[in-house]
Structures are given as C-alpha cells and as structure tokens.
Image: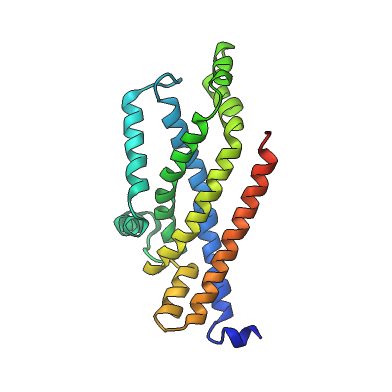
Amino acid sequence: MIEQWFPNVNWEKMWTATGETLYMSAYSTLFTFVLGIGLGLLLFLTSPGQLWANKITNVITGAFVNIFRSVPFIILIILLLPLTNLLIGTMRGPDAALPALIIGAAPFYGRMVLIALQEIDKGVIEAARSMGARTSTIIFKVLLPESMPALVSGITVTSIALVGYTAMAGVIGAGGLGTLAYLEGFQRNRGDVTLMATILVLVIVFVIQFIGDFIVNRLDKR
C-alpha cells in the first residue's frame, strides 16, 4: 500500500538520509548544549553584581552571541565554508554541516541559558556566597541544578531548530533528508519523495519534543 502512495521513494536512500539527519542533529545538539551553557554562564557571571563582574567581557560575549544568533543560517553556512573546509577537509556531507550548525545554534541557546539563570532566586545564590562557597560549587551545586528544567526545555527547542537547520544545509549538499528532498524530490519533480522526507522530519521533531517534555516534567520540582 505504501509503495502505491510513494512510488518514487527509494527506501534505502530514505533511511540513509534519515540516519544522516539524526547524526547531524545529535552531534550538533550535544556540542550546542555544552557551548551554550558555557556562553550563558559567562554572560551571567560577568554581568553587574555577579561573581565575575566584568563589563568588557560581558559586552564582548554579548556582542558575539547577538551577531551569530542574528545571521540567517543559510548565509552563515556560506560564510563558514572556508572554516568548514579547514576543519573537516570537505565542504560536503554530514560532517561538513556540523561547524555551521554548532556556531549557529550555540549563541541562540546561550541566550536561553542566560534567561534561565536570571530567573533563579537571588537569595539562593547569596546564601551560597555568604557560606563561602567557591565559584565552581555555586555553578555546579546551585546555578545549574536550579535552572535545569529551563535548560532542558531550551535545548529541546534548540534541538528542534537544529533539525530544521539540517534540512537547510541540504541545499549545499550536507546530506540528510534536506538534500534528499531537494535533489530527489524538488529537482526531479517527485512530490512523494519530498512529502516522505517532510513526514520523517516531523516524526523526529515530535519525538524530540516528547522526550524533552518528559525530562522537564521529571526535573521540575514545582
């Protein structure tokens, strides 16, 4: 029955493309999570009244975050092609998409991390400081645990955005469902191929959202 609805779909290519999309999304999400938390903590801790209060560092980091989260992703891919070629050795394939995916998403997530940290009760932080807690203790015992539900919610949103970014990266041959939909579907006028690729992207998004919501509900103490 499904072959009748999707007569032009090469299922081997479709599953391979799905695997490439999952690969790009998973790796970029992992690095985005780590780098985004680093950026968010740096923005928070260097803001006025915080442990590492430093106006210059805060302004420079904020400018970096604002610039890279404002550049349209398709333009960012093109701008980063020389860097991608230097790091990966090629400008095509799933690995070649990772630098642009990470650099494009980490500042966006870093801003969400900052918002999550700013929502923590200041009294909790002051109590830890008054007891002589070291900065590392405050970060890992207060800031991150208290903001973890918001951090997970933020990385869920970012991960879903990254799935969409992988589809856009397909336009320049990054692989995945985006490349398949563009080359095999759009350019060859095979609507069923594009439709199936879209359905699989939606399935991935729904699964990510379900997992994210489940984890947030388990972490939320309210």
Q: Is residue 124 left or right of residue 102?
A: right
Q: Is residue 136 above or below residue 1?
A: above
Q: Which residue is drawn at 33% across and 24% down?
A: 55
Which residue appears farthest toward the front when viewing the image? 222
Q: Is residue 38 above or below residue 121?
A: below
Q: Residue at x 65, y 52 (%)?
A: 211
Q: In this view, does 184 lie above or below 19?
A: below
| Most foreground residue, 173 or 159 | 159
Q: Which colour scheme is used?
A: rainbow
To which quarter of the image does residue 91 belong? bottom left
Q: In which quarter of the image is the C terminus?
A: top right
Q: Residue at x 47, y 40 (%)?
A: 112
Q: Which residue is drawn at 46% across and 74% down?
A: 181
Return the x and y of residue 159 as percentages of the image width and height: 52, 52
Q: In this view, does 119 lie to the left or right of 221?
A: left
Return the x and y of residue 83 as percentages of the image width and height: 33, 53
Q: Quadrant of the N terminus?
A: bottom right
Return the x and y of residue 94 as percentages of the image width and height: 46, 63
| Most foreground residue, 126 or 54 | 126
Return the x and y of residue 208 as percentages of the image width and height: 60, 55
To which quarter of the image does residue 87 belong? bottom left
| Most foreground residue, 2 or 89 | 2
The tally of labels here is 0
